[in-house]
Image: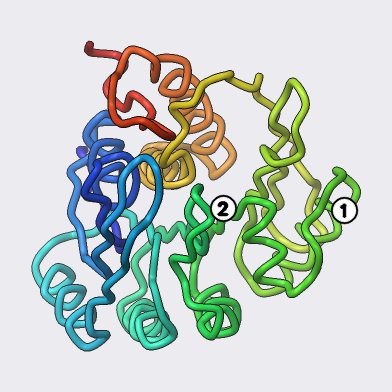
Amino acid sequence: MIPNVLTIAGSDPSGGAGIQADLKTFAALGAYGMSVLTGLTAQNTLGVRAVMSVPADFVTQQLDTVLDDVRVDAVKIGMLADASIVSAVATVLRDRRPSTVVLDPVMVAKSGDRLLLESAVDALRDELLPVVDLITPNLPEAADLLGVPEATTEPEMLEQLSALAAYGPAVLLKGGHLGGPDSPDLYLASPGAPVVRLSAPRVTTTNDHGTGCTLSSAIAALRPRSESWEDAIRAAKSYLTDALAAGDRLDVGHGHGPVHHFHRWY
């Protein structure tokens, strides 16, 4: 079966992140991709110049239109921009309950520009986390969600991992911001479950734009055909590592370029 996977996210006109990265990832991993737009950005590999949100009621109309017609095997959520969009998405998920939902809590672009208003962080944590299956924050996003300083050690990561899992979803806390030769990620299926440490060698490249979008999309695309979340996460991490390593084949922009989503083909 070819899974149908829906991304709910913003647009990146330079093609490295957002729905463009999501759809490329779905296609590269053999899934049929669909998209609901939550916002438009004016951005490139150097940074974000402007963000325009889609009205929340139109986000709801897009979601209902897809769900009324198409079997959706997995959902990936990215940039949601503001509290009204967060609430709209949470309401549809509660009412329609797709079987697999991955949330990448996109808050700040790699350039440092905010993609989620600070006023919407509470809504994301309190309304959306309880109705998704897996969240994939990096260390700054985890700290933002919890209102605490960013973790700088693995013991601090473990504390924040448990705190996030208490809101309901499984958590993949990404440790790339720690530095060092490896990028340690910690996975917790539920409060009290064993913590799984998933480490990958750090790839030295400037082509790292959209890595969070790509990883969460890969997990969503792979989960319907995987035995477990852990299996899907391991396969997604392997795909992303290869896409990062192949990124230097591309010549896109003058800043943080994209990963090579189709590295297996060209």
Residue at 38 percent across and 45 percent down: it is 217
* Residue 263 in picture, x, y percent from top left: 31, 16
Query: Type of residue at label 2?
Result: Thr
Residue 259 sits in quarter:
top left
Residue 64 sits in quarter:
bottom left
Q: Nearer the viewer, residue 150 or 22?
A: 150
Is disc 1 placed on a helix, strand or loop? Answer: helix
Residue 110 lies, with reference to residue 119, above or below; the image says: above
Is disc 2 placed on a helix, strand or loop? Answer: loop
Residues at discs 1 and 2 in contact (Cβ within 8 Å) = no
Q: Which mark is residue 134?
A: none
Q: Residue 156 carries which label?
A: 1
Q: Residue 136 carries which label?
A: 2
For marks 1 and 2, give the one nearer the viewer.
1
Q: Earlier in the sequence, mark 1 or mark 2?
A: 2
Residue 182 sits in quarter:
top right
User: Quadrant of the image for the C terminus?
Assistant: top left
Quick one: label 1, few (<14), some, or many (20+) residues within 10 Å?
Answer: few
Left or right: 62 in relation to 98: left
Residue 143 lies, with reference to residue 206, above or below; the image says: below
* Residue 104 in picture, x, y percent from top left: 48, 57
Residue at 48 percent across and 45 percent down: it is 212
Residue 16 lies, with reference to residue 242, above or below; the image says: below
Left or right: 86 in relation to 34: right
* Residue 82 in picture, x, y percent from top left: 41, 80
Q: Distance between the residues labelled 1 and 2?
A: 17 Å
Residue 257 lies, with reference to residue 167, above or below; the image says: above
